[in-house]
Amino acid sequence: MNILVTGGTGYIGSHTVVELLNKDHNVIIVDNLSNSKYEVLNRIKRITNKVVTFYQIDVCNKDDLKEVFKNHKIDSVIHFAGLKAVGESTEIPLKYYENNILSTLSLLEVMKEFNCKNLIFSSSATVYGYQSVMPINEEATLSATNPYGRTKLFIEYILKDLCLSDKSWNIALLRYFNPVGAHPTGLIGEDPNGIPNNLCPYITQVAIGKLPYLKVFGDDYDTIDGTGVRDYIHVVDLAVGHVCAIDKITTSPGLVIYNLGAGKGYSVLEMVKAFEKATGRKIAYKITPRRAGDIGTCYADASKAYNEMGFKTIKTIDDMAIDAWRFQQNNPDGIK
Ligand code: NAD
Ligand code: UFG
């Protein structure tokens, strides 16, 4: 199959491209490199021994996208391109609405024009807002607590409306929980700009000595040790989930929604322990007040993805820590 991957040089996109190539799909990547590096393409080639076609374009630009669809007969699209920093989205909301929503509208219009109607969209557990009942299943009420989350929620509604209006679309909304880890080769991984917002890249930067200590945001939640609990999913498992979703949408029509998580939660301090084991180093940390907007516990009911597309995670938190650490050590200053 010819699969167009938007945002394919990014963190989750690059791992998914590797899994698609491993399944002998032909991959075309479009990315504006606003949050990733060209070098990722060389790394993908080193891992798979295969080449992808790459276009450095902005998905918001319909004319550029049309050229890609003219050059290739695209069978399915995986749409990762988007801005994703929660904090930044509260500071520059218009940029988030413009980039995430316009890029999706422009992609959908071009797909329609070229009669390509198979799409996988990167959604997020953030669309569940605050939930009191765990695990969270796909029927839970939806809400958003910040502009980033609202872009995901709005796009989900846009895609649902599209499927209602035209039954020939086949769309999967994949709601990721907390993607972490890196490819076991250590060649690709999470490569944040500046000080990381997320837990695991922060921990690896403490381990390598770039940051002095981890701030643990609160130890007074109603959890095993008082620190926040999340459903961490190894990025390679997550990537495999996309390959399952491609099979699903191309064999059964309409709109499907799946949580992609491990179905189990770990606390911040449990993650710290896993990284201490993986790195053989002490991870310094200090307990600080809760981070605004955080919830205590969030983990997925992962059974629907297993029952309907046979997807389940296989990697452990030790794998996540070992692989994230290998990537950090191999790329102390990020991918160059
Ligand atoms: P990432 O920033 O590493 O990758 C996104 C890629 O999209 C980048 O390479 C960036 O350059 C590109 N991009 C952004 N806007 C673009 C545009 N207008 N045109 C072309 N390219 C553009 O992020 P990621 O972690 O790989 O996330 C991928 C998707 O998954 C995003 O939509 C994100 O919101 C979603 N998601 C991520 C997480 C997470 O924790 N990483 C969780 C849930 C959902
Ligand atoms: N945490 C710390 N210190 C840090 C960073 C995080 O203690 O420096 C804690 C948080 O309080 C939380 C846990 O570690 O308990 C995980 O935090 P992350 O920032 O790594 O992840 P979140 O669960 O807050 O959010 C992530 C993405 C969102 C996405 C959500 C669900 O950043 O975009 O997962 O997919 F919506």
Image: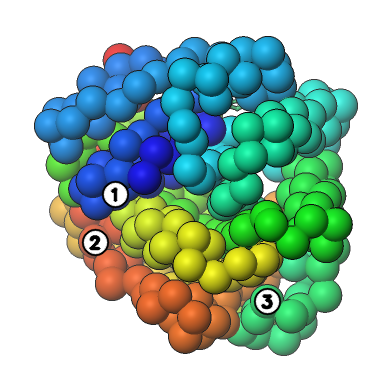
Q: How far apart are marks 2 and 1 (CA)?
A: 18 Å
Q: Which residue is drawn at the image coordinates 32% and 54% (left, top)?
A: 236
Judge left or right: residue 312 versus residue 175. Answer: left
Where is mark 1, residue-wise? 19
- Of tags 3 and 2, which is closer to the observer? 3
Q: Are there few (<14), some (14-19), or many (20+) residues within 10 Å of tag 1?
A: many
Where is mark 3, residue-wise? 138
Find ligand 1 in the image and state its quadrant: top right
Q: Distance between the residues labelled 1 and 3?
A: 25 Å
- Of tags 2 and 1, which is closer to the observer? 1
The circle on residue 145 is: none
Judge left or right: residue 123 versus residue 20. Answer: right
Q: Which amino acid does label 2 sit on?
A: Asp
Q: Which residue is drawn at the image coordinates 83% and 62% (left, top)?
A: 164
Q: Quarter holding the C terminus?
A: top left
Q: What residue type is labelled 1?
A: Glu
